[in-house]
Amino acid sequence: MEQVEVTAALASARRALAQNRSDEAFNVLVALVKSVPDDPEVFSLLGIAHASRKDYAHALDCFRKSLTLQPSARTHYNVANLYRIQGYLAPARRALREALKLDPGYRQAEKMLYELEEAQG
């Protein structure tokens, strides 16, 4: 697949996710994984698509694969959010700390970490 096609497919998947069309995004991203198996953004977006379908185990697998390919504050934040949704607060806090190591000014991560630490007591 040409880079132009990959870029267009990623844009299409992002739009579908933003419009809550997770099945459409999922189909685009599964096809992309076959064409560009080492693209961290593909795996990160596929993780978001899985999470929006409440398939948390596969979402976590995709986020981990993305992080293996390229550490990203945003992906660590997504992992934290996934753990938070499931009630796993300690791993969520760890993922947020990793996000903040990569991007110390990441406001959403700071906010969620503060909220989780307040909830811990």
Image: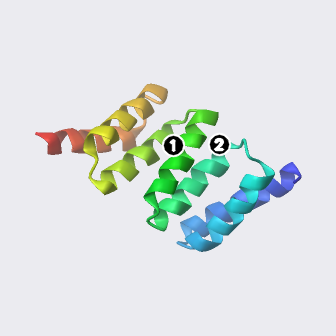
Return the x and y of residue 90 as percentages of the image width and height. 27, 39
Q: In the picture, residue 72 is in which quadrant?
A: top right
Q: How many marks?
A: 2
Q: Earlier in the sequence, mark 1 or mark 2?
A: 2
Tags 1 and 2 touching, CB below 8 Å:
yes
The residue that disc 1 covers is: 75
Would residue 60 appear left or right of 111 to someone viewing this image? right
Looking at the rendered structure, the secondary structure element under dot 2 is: helix
Q: Which mark is residue 44?
A: none
Quarter of the image with the N terminus is: bottom right
| Residue indicated by mark 2 | 40
Image coordinates of residue 115 in percent, x first then y, are 23, 45
Counting other residues with Cα less than 10 Å from the Cα at mark 2, is it few (<14), some (14-19), or many (20 or more)?
A: many
Q: Nearer the viewer, residue 4 or 93?
A: 93
Q: Residue at x 23, y 43 (%)?
A: 116
Quarter of image, res 29 = bottom right
Q: Which residue is rendered at x = 15% and y = 41% of the image?
A: 120
Could you tell me which secondary element the residue under label 1 belongs to? helix
- Where residue 103 appears, as percent x and y from the top left, is 47, 30
> x, y (%) of residue 46?
60, 56
Disc 1 marks a residue whose amino acid type is Thr
- Give the vertical position of 10 relative to 95 (above or below): below
